Amino acid sequence: MNRKLTSEDAVIVGGGVIGLSIAWQLAKEGWKVTILERDDIGQGTSWAGAGILPPANFSAASDPIDRLRGLSHKLFPTWSSELKATTGLDPGLRRCGGWYLAESLGELASLVGMADYWAHLDIESERLPMRELVKHEPALSSWAKQKTSIGAWWVPDEYQLCPPLYLRCLQTACEEAGVLIRTQCELEGVRAQSDMTCVRFDGRWHDCSRVVLCGGAWLNQFTEPLGLSHSVIPVRGQMLLLKTVTPISRRIINLGNRYLVCREDGHILIGSCEEEVGYQLGTTDEMISELRSFANSLIPALADAEHKRSWSGLRPMTYDGFPMIGRVPGTNNAYVAGGHFRSGLHLSTGTASVLCDLMVKREPVIDLDAFRVGKQISHRQTHLE
Ligand SMILES: Cc1cc2nc3c(=O)[nH]c(=O)nc-3n(C[C@H](O)[C@H](O)[C@H](O)COP(=O)(O)OP(=O)(O)OC[C@H]3O[C@@H](n4cnc5c(N)ncnc54)[C@H](O)[C@@H]3O)c2cc1C
């Protein structure tokens, strides 16, 4: 695209799933939009994620995070169809269903609690005896025979998303909608000046009509002038990718805080862990071998699967567990959308939809008070300083 940034543009900083989703929505509203990405598009945490979209139900939800999750969940199939129709590409969304398994009393108790929560939200789930589990999921037959295998639930409304495919679709949709995408272009600074926030890149300051900060785990690094210097903590997660010649399952298999995401083409993603190691990316032999043992213990046939690759990503965690979505206090035109921790892929559609509503001055369909920008910082101050 030959268009140049003008002061009418809304500038989105960060070309991950959150920035791309917001850019696409604003462009569809007829806005001029520019994305600044210091690397290539969609290579940050969004690429590294597993793409699990657990079940949710907007109409039954009352808690703020359940409302956001429910809204996002409801929007995903529509977004996916629209992305496919406009780009001709497969966004990689499948309603594959998920198994939730327990091997210890603690895991069982937590799944009993989950089943109550699902029932409360009118989300379908069914506890199956082991012999039924094996009928529906032969890949788990060896696991089901173990003495320690004490619980299995089936949850049909769980989706899997293939992040690289989805990000490529969003990027193409943005380009087709006229979004100017500047890659290898780092935001060097941001400053609030009376009613205008300016952004600095290419070595000089630029005016813009709005700025939306979507820098994921790196948000801290440029938000200090807006009073948001300690807004997120990076939490590393490692991931292992295996491949079998024929697909061994097509479901998501959850056990404790670990999972297997079985793709239709025989790829199997295995995750993950939570490590507070600052901004250090990379995998460790120890963790990758733990993930491999976890996979083998669930499905022994995976011992022969090909090790394709492993990687890590930095999840953006906030001090109160809620993402930040809204206008930066004390500014007229600076917004933040970030801090989605383990659920940024899932919450991206709802986040983009409500932030876009806010920016075009429509009433968002959910109350955003729990996500207001700055709330996370006051929690940090109250509890840590
Ligand atoms: C191992 C793992 C598994 C996960 N699994 C799931 C899952 O199953 N389901 C789910 O919903 N979520 C999952 N997540 C979480 C999810 O991936 C994140 O919440 C989400 O990707 C955050 O998106 P984002 O757009 O905010 O950040 P990012 O994707 O990191 O995008 C931020 C972008 O900002 C850019 N940037 C930073 N600083 C600057 C600057 N100064 N100038 C210009 N650009 C800049 C970065 O280069 C990056 O591209 C997982 C995460 C990990 C690590």
Image (tube, rainbow, N blue to C red):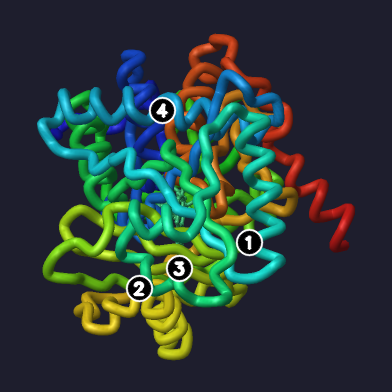
The amino acid marked with disc number 4 is Ala
Disc ID at residue 144: 3
Q: Which of the image's four quarters has the C terminus? A: bottom right
In this view, the residue in front, 144 or 175, is: 144
What amino acid does circle 2 point to?
Ile
Reading the chain from its start, which is encountered first: label 4 or label 2? 4
| Distance from Cα at disc 2 to Cα at disc 1 | 34 Å
Density class for disc 2 (Cα within 10 Å; few <14, some 14-19, many ≥20) is: some
Report crowding for label 4: few under 14, some 14 to 19, many 20 or more residues within 10 A (C-alpha). many
Residue marked by disc 1: 233
Judged by depth in the image, the label closer to the viewer, 3 or 4, is 3
Residue drawn where x is 68% and y is 37% of the image: 373
- Numbered tag placed on residue 299 in the rendering: 2
Which numbered disc, 4 or 2, marks the residue closer to the eye? 2
> In terms of secondary structure, where does tag 2 sit?
loop
Q: Residue at x 37, y 79 (%)?
A: 296
In this view of the protein, which residue sits in the foreground, 117 or 133? 133
Name the residue type under label 1.
Ile
First along the sequence among labels 3 and 4:
4
Residue 59 lies, with reference to residue 144, above or below; the image says: above
Q: Pinpoint residue 160: horizontal percent, then vertical percent.
A: 35, 46
How far apart marks 3 and 1 lie (CA) works out to: 38 Å
Q: Is residue 193 visible?
A: no
* Earlier residue among tags 2 and 1: 1
Inter-mark Cα distance, 3 to 4: 53 Å
Most foreground residue, 91 or 105: 105
- Which residue is disc 4 drawn over? 10
State whether residue 291 appears in this view.
yes
